[in-house]
Image (cartoon, rainbow, N blue to C red):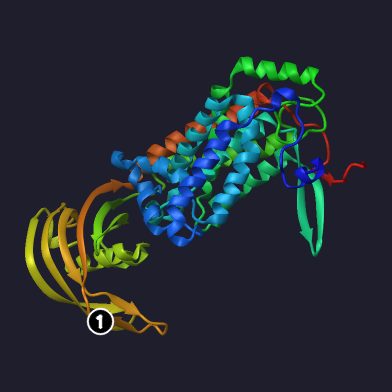
Amino acid sequence: MTDTLKRSVGIPVGGSPISRKRPIAALAVVMLNIAVYAITSYENLFLQVSDYWVSAGGFVPSLIAMPSQWYRIFSSMFLHADFFHILFNMYFLYIFGRAVEDALGRWRFLILYMVSGVAASVFHTAFSFIGGATAYVIPAIGASGAISGVLGAYLILFPGTSLVMGWGFLFFPIFFRMKAAYYLIFWFATQVIYGFARLGGSTAVFAHAGGFIAGIALLPLVVNKERFLQFKLTRQQALFPAFIAFTPKTFKTGGLGRTAKTIVVVLLASLLFGTAYASTGLSIQGDIKSATVQYAFQGTPYMDYVGFQLPNVGDQLASVSLDETRILLNRLYAAELLYNEAKAGENVSLNNWNLTLSMRVGNRPVQVGLAIIRFNGKYDGDGFLSYGVGELETQVIFIDYYGKPSVSDYLVNYSFELASQTVNLTYITQSTGILSLVATAVALAVTVKKDRELALIGEEPERFWRPFSSPVV
């Protein structure tokens, strides 16, 4: 493959003999992510992750108050929604990660990667108030936050490198050279703008922004000064730089250019304001019932997480993503075993209780049979089930193409255990907001004061873009 073709698809080229080291850490992370994706998506023919793994391993903001659920901060970093999600994430991790790993070393690169992933979850929690209370119970997955940390580090280390971008115009591809700094800043700006404008949809854009900020803020802490000095001395003696992902035009190390730095500072300042607002505790107020449900459906084990704001629990059940969980909770709620103000502070035990539930699907009434084989529950002061264990059998409702419901002529079996606690949204938003505020302030200081010191390839004065022409051979 020629260097021109490699550049056109973003494959790194060039370098002196000492740059021939394989990016072991970056490749290891890529392979680990691919292996986890294979395990979690094989049930869906590797096209998308199964709902079970999203429920069991996705990061849910309201769970940050429960130490037993902190594993989700790390597990969510290795789960991906579908084939294209992991494809593009791993592509960018390799393209930019190999350069950052070469500059920092394997272990320091891994530290930056993992801590950036943690910071992404913290930022996501701090800014969840923008989406309202329901945003605190939606699982988030993906390595994008950790990879964003690598991108933030790359921006400071190599702002003067360039990319060859390809754009399809009708049937004709057009290639042009663009500064890596502008590409990364444009991407960072879209995350910030989409986040504040609530245009991100199901994408955790503030997690991306938080990871990017962490990558910048952590850089002075993970840099090996002796290694940096060695690289800078090598650059003065070598014809080509030894440690970059894309070949620059000059070897000037001036840090971020004035325009680039101004844009980054403005974006960081806007996030600084947002984190300061989250830190005040005024951004969102109230409690949420955070519940972990472990159960067996027809003998198959499941685990899920749900959250509700009182008193309108019934209206929120429809948002439970896993069908098996939604059926179980619907039956418990309809039988007044999930939430009932009259049961506040009580302990309830039931055995062999048969009843017929009157439920509605749209505007249609439906009669569903339910048999509580055994149930033991304890209710908190609001009447919500704080701990319950039991077994039940129930009919299942089916809805046809025209929206007409029908009830199964058989019963399905559940054995379940549910544990919940009251989570104060103000507290978790304020706590994560303070951490995000500190990280953003440090990133702002690094951008303003340390960019020249940390830059291995600084920006050069040139146009925003220029046409890419293939060298004559």
Using residue 179 as the reference point, say whether residue 405 is left or right of it. Answer: left
Along the line of sight, the residue nearer the viewer: 59 or 446: 59
Q: Is residue 108 visible?
A: yes
- The percent coordinates of residue 219 (x first, y second) are 57, 27
- The percent coordinates of residue 105 (x first, y second) are 58, 24
Residue at figure coordinates x 74%, y 24% from the top left: 17
Amino acid at pointer 1: Val
User: Disc 1 marks which residue?
Assistant: 366
Along the line of sight, the residue nearer the viewer: 81 or 440: 81
Residue at figure coordinates x 65%, y 19% from the top left: 228
Using residue 384 as the reference point, say whether residue 162 is left or right of it. Answer: right
Is the C terminus in the top left, top right, bottom left or bottom right quadrant? top right
- Res 49 quadrant in image: bottom left
- The percent coordinates of residue 36 (x first, y second) are 46, 47
Q: Secondary structure at mark 1?
A: strand
**Label 1 crowding class (10 Å Cα cut-off): few <14, some 14-19, many 20+?**
some
Along the line of sight, the residue nearer the viewer: 227 or 349: 227
Residue 91, relative to residue 215: is it above or below? Answer: below
